[in-house]
Image (cartoon, helix red, strand yellow):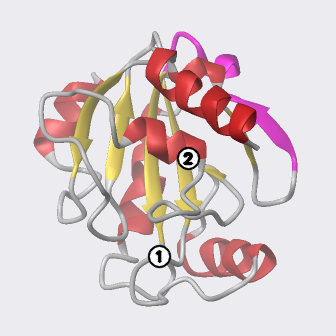
Amino acid sequence: MKTLLLTAILLFTTTTSIHTFEFQTIDGKTMSFSSFKGKKILIVNTASKCGYTSQYEDLEKLHKQYGSKLIIIGFPANNFGGQEPGSNSDINSFCKKNYGVSFIMASKVSVKGSDMIPLFKWLTTQENSDFTGDIRWNFEKFLIDENGKLIHRYRSGTNPLDKDLLNAIK
């Protein structure tokens, strides 16, 4: 167990690119971030019963407008106010039915606390132009450049179609 923990700590301190990580899609397939090399990636921790849930609509617009050079991945999480209580199947149905989501959705994960997945441990410790540390609420956004480096982090209140975010994508 100690060896596994030390390996995980070493991974977080030496990993310089998101391209070393994999994730499970909402329908159970394994995807590697390395398959997105050369494109920007927007990672968003999502929830179906949040005041920011309507951002799914603008995330879908962003996906349709910039899908050739931007990969959007929603990571459902139930870490804030129990606002994502459903199963992967429930979440997937909700997103498609209510917002027509066609961008990538990951399996439900933890983005905060002792059970936080390694990807979010890495994301929340990367230096960027804004801040590091814990995610405060649902719909925080992490913009990754074409080489797998975090270039900008946006809090929940930043709309996916915000001018600054759009300029960072272009």
Q: Residue at x 43, y 53 (%)?
A: 44
Q: Is residue 16 magenta?
A: no
Q: Is 129 situated above or below 37?
A: below
Question: Is residue 92 or residue 84 the one in the foreground?
Answer: 84
Task: Give how far apart the Cα atoms at labels 1 and 2 are.
Answer: 18 Å
Residue 17: tell me if it is visible. yes
Nearer mark to the viewer, of 1 and 2: 1
Q: Label 1: which residue? A: 79
Could you say which quadrant of the image residue 91 lies in? bottom right
User: What's under tag 1, amino acid-wise?
Assistant: Asn
Residue 68: tell me if it is visible. no
Residue 152, how many percent across, how many down? 24, 33
Pointer 1 with pointer 2, Cβ within 8 A: no
Could you say which quadrant of the image residue 167 lies in? top left
Taking 26 as reference, is 77 left or right? Answer: left
Span of residues in magenta: 29-39
Mark 1: few/some/many CA within 10 Å (<14, 14-19, 20+):
many
Residue 22, how many percent across, how many down? 71, 34
User: What's under tag 2, amino acid-wise?
Assistant: Ile
List the single residue furthest toward the front: 2
Image mark count? 2
Q: Is residue 31 magenta?
A: yes
Residue 43, how many percent across, how many down? 46, 45
Q: Residue at x 25, y 50 (%)?
A: 161
Q: Element type at marker 2?
A: strand
Question: Which of the image's four quarters has the N terminus?
Answer: top right
Q: Residue at x 40, y 46 (%)?
A: 62
Q: Is 4 situated above or below 74?
A: above
Taking 101 as reference, is 120 left or right? Answer: left
For residue 73, which numbered disc appears in the image?
Answer: 2
